[in-house]
Amino acid sequence: MMSSRSVVEPYVSSRRLANLLMVILAVNIVVQLVAIGLTFMHIDLLYKIMEETTAVARAQRQTGEAREAVMRIVQLATFIIAVVAFLFWLHRAYKNLKPLGVEPRYSPAWAVGAFIVPLVNLVLPFQIVQEMWRASDPDTTAVTGAKSLNIITEDSSKSLLVVVWWGLWLLTIINLILAYRWQVSWQILNEEIIASWLIILLSLLLIIDSIVTVVLVKKIADRQDEKNRRLAELAAPPENLLPPQIA
């Protein structure tokens, strides 16, 4: 009797989850662009208060601060939704490694958990995504054929795209921590302006990171689908071995 652990689940494309994630990331980009515009308006208001060249009503400043608070909530909400959608996609894509003929180093649950565990999430997620990139290489199913030398998109051992994606993610987290510390601890207008500029930098990093994540997710989904197609072709019996058709 076959053990349940030895049963390989069928391949299920991550394409639908990837498409959903890309839509969410596109929404996140729009939100960050709006946030940048509103934060510039807030900085302009703060400079006017400092220079005292324009009489700024108390109600006007309160309105601006309320608008900023609402925008931060929207930013946080879209960010959390994007992260959750990414982890769902990651779970599905990593789960596909076994059907693609590769024994993964970790379980799909641990691939997701690696992003949550402190300290571990500084290194392991990068290694997991690199492993997923290598294991999804469709060229590993070919008997012959030259491999592309484009390190960014096609190298099966490691991808510069994953390195860039992970570097941007770490920069975003560092900037998020700095922006939060300035935002909750400022006492004078100069410090509030610095906090606002850090928030603009955070939005720019999130935009760039979202674009790179879209490219990365799409390419991994493409590689897995193509590898699965090639494996299916290799598994199919040759036409000359098929039984003759009865007229």
Image: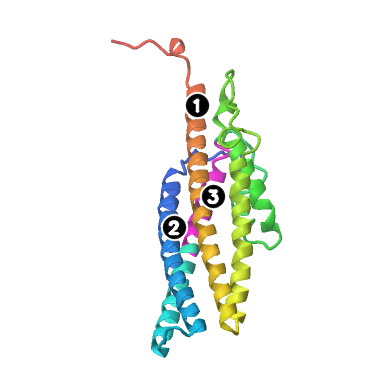
Query: Mark 1 belongs to which amino acid?
Result: Arg
Q: Which residue is nearer to you in this view: 82 or 110?
A: 82
Q: Quadrant of residue 158?
A: top right
Farthest residue in the left direction?
Answer: 247
Residue position for label 2: 29
Q: Amino acid at mark 2?
A: Ile
The picture places residue 140, in percent across and down from the top left corner, at 59, 27
Residue ID at (40%, 58%): 27
Quadrant assignment for the N terminus: top right
Circles 3 and 2, Cβ within 8 Å, touching? The answer is no
Which residues lie in the magenta part?
A: 80-99
**Does residue 234 appear in the picture of this structure?**
yes
Where is mark 3, residue-wise? Answer: 90
The residue under the point 50% across, 82% down is 51
| Amino acid at pointer 3 | Leu
Query: In screen coordinates, is 238 left or right of 122?
Result: left
Residue at mark 1: 230
Residue 45 has which mark? Answer: none
Q: CA distance from mark 1 to mark 2?
A: 35 Å
**Circle 3 or circle 2, nearest the eye:** 2
Crowd class of label 1 (few under 14; some 14 to 19; many from 20; radius 10 Å): some
Question: Can residue 1 be seen here?
Answer: no
